[in-house]
Amino acid sequence: MAINKAAYQQLNEELRLMNITLVAVSKTKPIEDIRALYNLGHRDFGENYVQELVEKAEQLPTDIRWHFIGHLQTNKVKSIVPFVYLIHGVDSLKLLNEINKQAGKNSRVIHCLLQVHIAQEETKFGFDENELFNLDISQFENVKINGLMGMASLTDDINKIRTEFKHLKTIAEKLKATTPQLQTLSMGMSSDYKIAIEEGSNMVRIGSLLFGERNYPE
Ligand SMILES: *Cc1c(COP(=O)(O)O)cnc(C)c1O
């Protein structure tokens, strides 16, 4: 497998002009593919399995900004806290407390995004709106919450996807009124990033468009 260099360069330029961060999602893809993108100047990479992330990080340059985008179990937090750049899918208070504790042990402040449950499907993780408005995000000394992350339903129904992204953007704006630090809005993947951007995303997580289809699902 090789990376799609032309697609990368075009997308990267397009997003750069709009000040949108491109997280290249390299899960299941080999080290050589990551290195190929790195050699084109890319630094933000996303992974969603702890073990895979740890193994890759050990073999790759230390100036890569590793984004953890998967569902993180509390017992795995300590493996990634020493080096992770941004944890996208923080979906419970329990997880926040554990990240805070492990970050303290590593004398780090870990940047996190709170995952919001916007898809109608039951299986998606995340806080719901009420929980978010009741959460005191200043209580964590070693965690800095930078914004929100969300995933739309897996559907071909573009209107449904748009409605879900719109909803997340609305929540983000409401929270920002009292908590201005919540600047980042991570939404959009290969299939729906254009809609996400139209609805206000400033960080997209793109895998298959850059690296080709994955052989097995996440
Ligand atoms: C795999 C994954 C992506 C990227 O998916 P593509 O469809 O390959 O772009 C984005 N976000 C999360 C949370 C993922 O697990």
Image (cartoon, grey):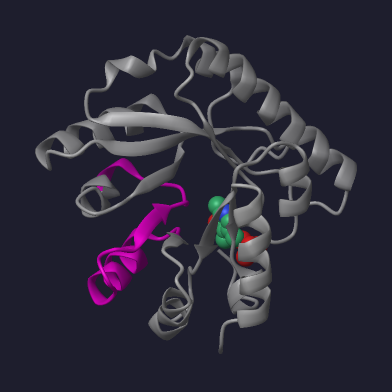
| The C terminus lies in quadrant | bottom right
Q: Left or right of 96: which side holds 103?
A: left
Quadrant in the picture for residue 14: bottom right
Residue lying at 29% horizontally and 30% vertically, measured from the top left: 143
Residue 13 seen by the camera? yes
Residue lying at 71% horizontally and 40% vertically, measured from the top left: 121
Residue lying at 42% horizontally and 79% vertically, measured from the top left: 39
x then y, percent, for residue 12: 61, 64
Quadrant in the picture for residue 212: bottom right
Q: How many marks?
A: 0
Magenta segment includes 54: yes
Q: Left or right of 175: which side holds 153?
A: right
Magenta segment includes 60: yes
Q: What span is in magenta?
A: 47-75
x then y, percent, for residue 5: 61, 81
Quarter of the rendered image showing ligand 1: bottom right
In this rendered view, identify the residue nearer to me: 185 or 162.
185
Residue 74 sits above or below residue 143 on the image: below
